[in-house]
Amino acid sequence: MFEKKQKGFLKDRRGFSLIEMLIVVTLLAIVVIMTSDTFTIVIKQSGQQTKIVESQMEGIIGLEMLRTDIEQAGFGLPWAFMNAVNYSEASTSPAAEYDDAPSNVPRAILKGDDVNYVGYKQGSDYLVIKSTSAGISDTSQKWTYIIYNQAPKAWSTGALSAGERVVVIKPKLDMVGQPRLVVLTDGTFSCQMEEETDAGGNTYATVPAGFRPTQPGEKYMIYGVDPDTPLRMPFNRTDYYVKIPAAMPTHCATGTGVLYKGVVSQGSGTLTELPLIDCVADMQIIIGLDTNGDGVIDSRVTTIDGFSAQQIREQVREVRVYILAQEGERDRSYKHGSQIFVIRDTIDGSAVLVKNVDLGTITEWSRYRWKQYTLVAKPKNLYQ
């Protein structure tokens, strides 16, 4: 009896046959192949989505910097000079083409239309913003005022300190005259904040005597420009352009460029470049004008060549910027619907064609996704 049970137990513990093992291994191999393909697709799509999100974040940050500079265009700029002045701006090409130096009143907004500079994205626009706040230093964001026979107004935060470089403007009085840059008789148009001590032993930062109000009740505006560099221009300046660097990001399509914010150095006149958006195919700009002074935009133009500083102050009311940029990486599973990407906008209820961009010049253009960024900004400091 015991022997029978033992034989039955041994029979039940028999292993799988060779054919059964082959079937299981084959099924397992099929499952592995199927899951690996799925995993590869998931990884690929995840990477594509990550790049798309990165592109969108770049666009948001870059556009906000651009919006701020446009809105502050003209901030701290003079309309005239108290004495003869001689200053410098950009020292390199093509930025130097937009200089108002050495003695002209600075124009707050300038634009190059469909430029063709070597090393830049052909057919894109070039934008120049001038204001004291267009710099990238903390000093360029500071300002205060000084009244005759008083110390400058000291803010609780962001106060100007001794050693910082500033310009001083005498504002117009009761809508009479023009805001004028204080320039000494020897042509000096800027100064450093100085430290002084009042009767109570308290120290404060002020401007040198030659830059202070001279009449009772008179008030001058003080604008920070640079933390410590002798000023070559009585304002700061930043240029926006699409340039093709020597080493483009590897995920960008051939023929695209990078949108840069180029800040003109007060020391050398060269541009300190900050990359804002990668893989840009085009940037276009439309400027809204109020030509009759009634407060309503009645004309939209692509160029303001020949406009004086006064015309820009009085007429420019809106700047629309359109940026066409690659979204994500090349995707072999994707095919763009058309060779022509139409940059368009709806203005005052009407559809407006901004530009037809031929993507056929970009290698494998049909395998990339494209996004149009539209920015509408209204300068707040031109007419004051």
Image (cartoon, rainbow, N blue to C red):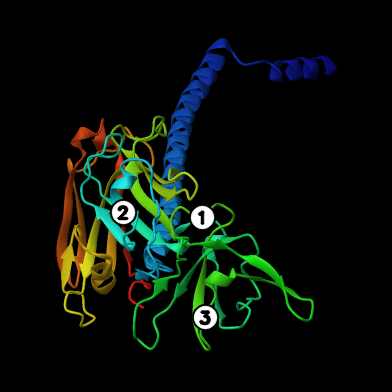
| Secondary structure under the numbered disc 1 in the rendered image | loop
Front-lying residue, 246 or 195: 195
| Secondary structure under the numbered disc 3 in the rendered image | loop
Q: Which mark is residue 214?
A: 3
Front-lying residue, 140 or 126: 140
* Of pointers 3 and 2, the one earlier in the residue sequence: 2
Report the number of numbered marks. 3
Tell me residue 27's x, y (percent). 49, 23
| Secondary structure under the numbered disc 2 in the rendered image | strand
* Of pointers 2 and 1, the one earlier in the residue sequence: 2
Within the image, what quadrant is residue 115 found in? top left
Badge 3, how many Cα within 10 Å: few under 14, some, many 20+? some
Badge 2, how many Cα within 10 Å: few under 14, some, many 20+? many
Find disc 2 in the rendering and name its residue.
Answer: 127
Query: Does any portion of residue 375 appear in the rendered image?
Result: no
Within the image, what quadrant is residue 37 found in? top left
- Amino acid, disc 3: Thr
Q: Which mark is residue 136?
A: 1
- Amino acid, disc 1: Ile
Tell me residue 119's x, y (percent). 31, 34
Within the image, what quadrant is residue 131 found in? bottom left
